[in-house]
Image (spheres, coloured by chain):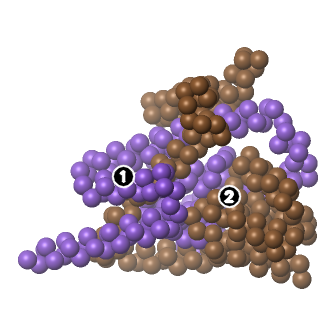
Chain colours: A brown, B purple
Amino acid sequence: MIYLYLFVSFLQVGMFSFGGGYAAMPLIQEQVVTIHHWLDISEFTDLVTLSQMTPGPISINAATFVGIKIAGIPGAIVATGGCVLPSCVIVMIIAKVYLKYRKMGMLQGILNALRPAVIAMIASAGISILITAFWGNAAIKLINTNWSLMIIFVICFALLQKLKMNPIGVMVFAGIMKLGLSFLQR
Amino acid sequence: MKNKKSILRKLFFSCLYLSTFTFGGGYVIVTLMKKKFVDDYHWIDENEMLDLVAIAQSSPGPIAVNGAIVIGYKLAGILGAVTAILGTIIPPFLIISVISVGYHSFSDSYFISQILEGMQAGVGAVIASVVYEMGVGIAQEKDKISLLIMAGAFAASCVYKINVVYIIIVCGMIGVIRTFLSKKGGEK
């Protein structure tokens, strides 16, 4: 029975979270904390912190975390399955329509208008990541700036643009640079 | 058949690899997918990739998973979509499973917090670099409406924090209106 509850709860999270991780957070909280009491609020906060520190979408992380806690590995599998099922069905249907009709004038018009918007939204996501990196939760002022991260950013950007380095290599290198710098600053 | 198998294998391991190293949400992995599948493998062209990202964004569910599904489906049908999903969800599944046992020692570690802080700057640089390349592409088309849409969408999401779904709906409607107007213009 618990498997069914887990499945249905995360099915709803998957089905109604539009617009990425931060939009999913309140939905997850409602299902997991308010309705089913699978986690208390401090465990939920831990989950959010953990999600920010580990790779992967927050809803998948939440499904795994809650599933394991409530019903072990099978619970985690069921919850994760529920979470991705709506995406599978909906995205595949849209993809099918897109691949079939994309030569149509109207769809072309819509897609042409969406492309610049997609770039803008990716840029906006990048900027909010950088603001968190450079200023954390403090006000955006020169004095609060985390200069070591800003220098790392500039070096990484140059490595990507000028040397065409592998992006994951650059990301790992950025982490190592920060660790090295923090020891120098001590 | 052998060709399809090799595509599926490459797709699976690409998703596995990208998902393992992608901190910071769906947009980051979508950016890396663009680098991998458009720039390295040449499986998808750049405009098509932007269309696929738009589909991933406007559908419900995690953007990373949606991105994997739409790319996998485009490359190898339903089997491709399933392969890409597995590649994408296995890393977070394993990592959370392992960490959930003793997560306080993990989240309190000084080493890990420093590395993660540095990686944020790296992630920002990766996104900046991809956005720069794609933005230059749009700017070179010298289409005023595209530039306006780009600026407007940027203000809406970055300054006013409007949910992406609304931005996509409005931009889609601009596209519809524009298509109608240009058809009328063409008939005259």
| Residue B52: x %, y % from top left | 47, 64
Mark 1–mark 2 distance (CA, rounded to whole Å): 28 Å
Q: Is residue B123 visible?
A: no
Q: Nearer the viewer, residue B23 or B87?
A: B23
Q: Chain of mark 1?
A: B
What percent of the width, then of the height, locates residue B114? 73, 32
Q: Is residue A184 above or below residue B62?
A: above
* Residue drawn at the location 63% of the way across and 32% of the way down: A174
For badge 1, the amino acid type reads Ala
What SS does tag 1 mark? helix
Number of the label disc, if any, that sits on residue B151: 1
- Do marks 1 and 2 both belong to one polypeptide chain? no
- Residue under the image location 75 percent in, 20 percent down: A183
> Residue A112, percent across and down?
33, 64
Crowd class of label 2 (few under 14; some 14 to 19; many from 20; radius 10 Å): many
Q: Which one is in front in this view, the residue at disc 1 or the one at disc 2?
A: 1
Q: Quadrant of residue A68?
A: bottom right
Q: Residue furthest left?
A: B188
Q: Residues within 10 Å of mark 1 (few under 14, many from 20)?
A: some
> Which residue was labeled with disc 2?
A57
* Residue B114 to residue B14: above or below: above
Query: Which percent across, then down, holds residue A11?
Result: 71, 76
Secondary element under disc 2, as helix, strand or loop, is loop
Q: Quadrant of the N terminus of chain B?
A: bottom right
Left or right of residue A69: residue B68: left
**Viewer-proximal residue among B135 and B44:** B135
Determine the residue positioned at 39% across, 63% down.
A114
